[in-house]
Amino acid sequence: MEQARQARNVAILIFEHVEPLDFVGPFEVFISGSNDGKDFNVYTIAEHDSPVKAFGGLSINPTYTIATCPKPDILIVPGGWGSRKEMLNETITKWIREVSDEIEIILSVCTGALILAKANLLDGLNVTTNRSAVNELRDIVPATTVILDEARYVDNGKIILSGGVSAGMDASLYVLEKLWGKDRAINAANIMEYDWKKA
């Protein structure tokens, strides 16, 4: 009898002043595309186990800390105003760098690209971010990094980057398609009644 494949762990990083849709959008995509939880185990992670206050005052209790979470197969790094502080948080950037070798896919949303840049993961890649943060990203990436400021999302293999806010949902659906096929992604978009904008 064929052994069932274990659900992939999808860890979504949250932090103070994270943009809500940057993390809730991908959360919804992977839940909707999870085949009733059989294919994805989706959870939030933070540096500490105390409630995190997102942009606009939304309070979230992280499921795990970065020290206690199950090993991620997919890591979502959202953006928002708080990313400017978190990109300087060596605890976070060091953790991302250390786990990156064993992760199947890392997806940044919006200014989550700034955090990946500070984790030294964007050398030689094609990248994108929120249009309003392109210059900030340009200031911190290596000269070998190519910024595609009009791209909705960009696939470098392991590392996928998306533009602002709702683009993270489009990129998440793209990841779903990449892993489980077009029908799964379309079905998830239909469940959410979401108009998927492909890159």
Image (cartoon, grey):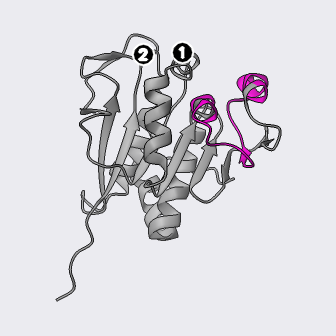
Location of residue 62 by image quarter: top left
| Residue type at numbered disc 1 | Lys
Report the magenta residues as a range. Answer: 114-139
Instruction: Find residue 122 and report its horizontal and vertical position in percent.
Output: 67, 42
Does any portion of residue 149 appear in the rendered image? yes
Going 69% across and 53% down the picture, which residue do you hit? 199
Instruction: Find residue 41 and report its horizontal and vertical position in percent.
Output: 28, 52
Q: Mark 1 points at which residue?
A: 85
Which secondary structure lies at badge 2?
A: loop
Location of residue 134 by image quarter: top right
Instruction: Find residue 139 and report its horizontal and vertical position in percent.
Output: 78, 24
Does any portion of residue 195 appear in the rendered image? no
**Mark 1 to mark 2 CA distance (whole Å):** 9 Å
Q: Is residue 59 left or right of residue 183?
A: left
**Around disc 1, counting alpha carbons within 10 Å, would you say few (fewer than 14), some (14 to 19), or many (20 or more)?**
few
| Residue type at numbered disc 2 | Glu
Instruction: Find residue 63 and report its horizontal and vertical position in percent.
Output: 24, 33
User: Which residue is at the front of the view, 21 or 10?
Assistant: 10
Q: Is residue 130 magenta?
A: yes
Q: Name the residue under label 2.
A: 16
Which secondary structure lies at badge 1?
A: helix
Going 29% across and 21% down the picture, which residue do you hit? 48
